[in-house]
Image (tube, grey):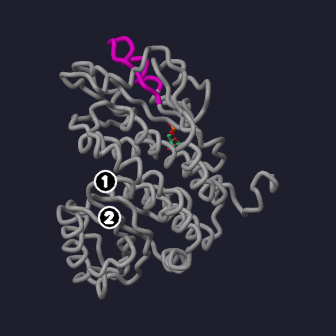
């Protein structure tokens, strides 16, 4: 087993480190296969626009939330994203033209049940999965593989960023995408692997922050826009592997309830991008600071707005904001990993959790 860990202490950290390579490889190789229906992704380019539903569970659901932002921003289409487990209780609805099902294992019972129901209603199914030949790929009309290779650690890491990568590739394949956005995204994706490597090579701040988080009994994660789902994912990672009660919120929702939890002993981890949400994020951070909560900010290097505001700043390389969720995700994976390591948790196999949940 030690050999398979490639010299790392755990599969989770090994898999975190594989991400630059996986993303670089899928930049150059084709990941589109298993087509039963000619170019189903072409549906995204239809006029009038089709109705689109994204279904997923757990970490894959967070990838779905990011996909919604991207499809709406770049293709101008509206998208519904739902937890597959909840979708299965919805009775009355007009079936969408296209459902994109995101599932690492391709065997999650809730996702498969949703796929079977949608098929009966004539919805076309596009699966994004990591496991060739999985049940989801057999139920789908078309499958896009994430190509992350086997993921052993129960907590999803490389499969998540690989899912995001496929979502960007899907966008790039759409004729609806404007030329300048195509060029912008292509360049951003080309530069991304070295930015991720930059995070992996500079873990000093992440490790010292993890030491601090290991002493906390609760943590709040916040983000806005594209990085709101990353706040959810950061909180999920920390609770999964370090067993610290953690909750992710849209920063704007803090004042509608969660602010009551903010205190000197409840740190807030803020995920920032360099985009239109930045000023609103700083306003929220000031509100938190006034209440005395320790503030940890993950932000592009040289964000002056954070000086004197954040207690810990985890600077990450500058990337195009469109791909910033992938980079921020890696920071939060490392933060969860080192916090769990500090606490001596069984990182690869957290209690009560399974890699693939094949029961409803
Ligand atoms: C389990 C795993 C999670 C995963 C979720 C959805 O709960 O522990 O890491 O995100 O299932 O799995 P899927 O294979 O459908 O992406």
Q: Is residue 117 magenta?
A: yes
Quarter occupied by residue 78 = top left
Q: Which residue is drawn at 53% across and 61% down?
A: 194
Residue 196, position as x, y percentages in the image: 52, 61
Q: Is residue 245 magenta?
A: no
Q: Residue at x 51, y 29 (%)?
A: 32
- Asked whether the residues under the numbered discs 1 and 2 touch, taking CB atoms below 8 Å apart as contact, a structural biologist would say yes
Q: Is residue 80 above or below residue 253?
A: above
- Label 1 near ligand 1 (CB < 8 Å): no
Q: In this view, does 288 lie above or below 180?
A: below
Direction from residue 198 to residue 278 in the image, left or right = left
Residue 97, position as x, y percentages in the image: 29, 20
Label 2 crowd (10 A; few <14 / some 14-19 / many >=20): many
Label 1 crowd (10 A; few <14 / some 14-19 / many >=20): many
Q: Distance between the residues labelled 1 and 2?
A: 8 Å
In-front residue for pair 213/140: 140
Say the numbered circle drawn on residue 226. 1
Direction from residue 157 to residue 329 in the image, left or right = left
Quarter occupied by residue 111 = top left
Q: Is residue 194 above or below residue 309?
A: above
Residue 35, position as x, y percentages in the image: 50, 19
Sequence-wise first label, 1 or 2: 1
Residue 323, position as x, y percentages in the image: 39, 54
Span shown in magenta: 112-127
Say the numbered circle drawn on residue 273. 2
- Label 2 near ligand 1 (CB < 8 Å): no
């Amino acid at each position: 087993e030690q050999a398979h860990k490639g010299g790392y202490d755990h599969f989770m950290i090994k898999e975190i480190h594989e991400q630059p390579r996986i993303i670089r490889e899928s930049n150059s190789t084709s990941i589109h296969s298993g087509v039963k229906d000619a170019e189903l992704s072409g549906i995204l380019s239809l006029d009038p626009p089709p109705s689109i539903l994204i279904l997923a569970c757990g970490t894959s659901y967070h990838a779905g939330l990011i996909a919604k932002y991207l499809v709406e921003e770049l293709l101008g289409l509206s998208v519904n994203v739902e937890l597959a487990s909840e979708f299965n209780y919805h009775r009355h609805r007009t079936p969408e033209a296209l459902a994109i099902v995101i599932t690492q294992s391709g065997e999650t019972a809730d996702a498969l049940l949703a796929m079977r129901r949608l098929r009966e209603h004539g919805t076309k199914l596009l699966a994004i999965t990591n496991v060739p030949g999985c049940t989801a790929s057999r139920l789908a009309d078309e499958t896009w593989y994430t190509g992350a290779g086997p993921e052993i650690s129960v907590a999803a890491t490389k499969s998540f960023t690989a899912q995001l990568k496929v979502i960007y590739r899907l966008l790039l394949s759409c004729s609806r995408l404007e030329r300048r956005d195509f060029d912008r995204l292509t360049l951003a994706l080309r530069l991304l692997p070295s930015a991720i490597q930059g995070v992996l090579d500079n873990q000093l701040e992440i490790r010292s922050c993890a030491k601090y988080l290991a002493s906390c009994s609760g943590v709040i994660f916040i983000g806005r826009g594209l990085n709101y789902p990353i706040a959810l994912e950061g909180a999920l990672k920390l609770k999964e592997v370090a067993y610290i009660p953690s909750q992710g919120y849209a920063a704007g929702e803090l004042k509608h309830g969660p602010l009551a939890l903010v205190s000197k002993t409840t740190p807030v981890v803020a995920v920032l991008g360099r985009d239109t949400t930045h000023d609103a994020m700083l306003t929220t951070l000031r509100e938190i600071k006034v209440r005395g909560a320790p503030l940890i900010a993950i932000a592009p290097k040289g964000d002056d707005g954070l000086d004197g505001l954040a207690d810990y700043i985890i600077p990450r390389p500058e990337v195009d904001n469109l791909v910033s969720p992938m980079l921020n995700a890696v920071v939060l994976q490392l933060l969860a990993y080192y916090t769990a390591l500090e606490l001596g948790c069984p990182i690869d196999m957290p209690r009560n959790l399974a890699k693939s949940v094949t029961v409803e």
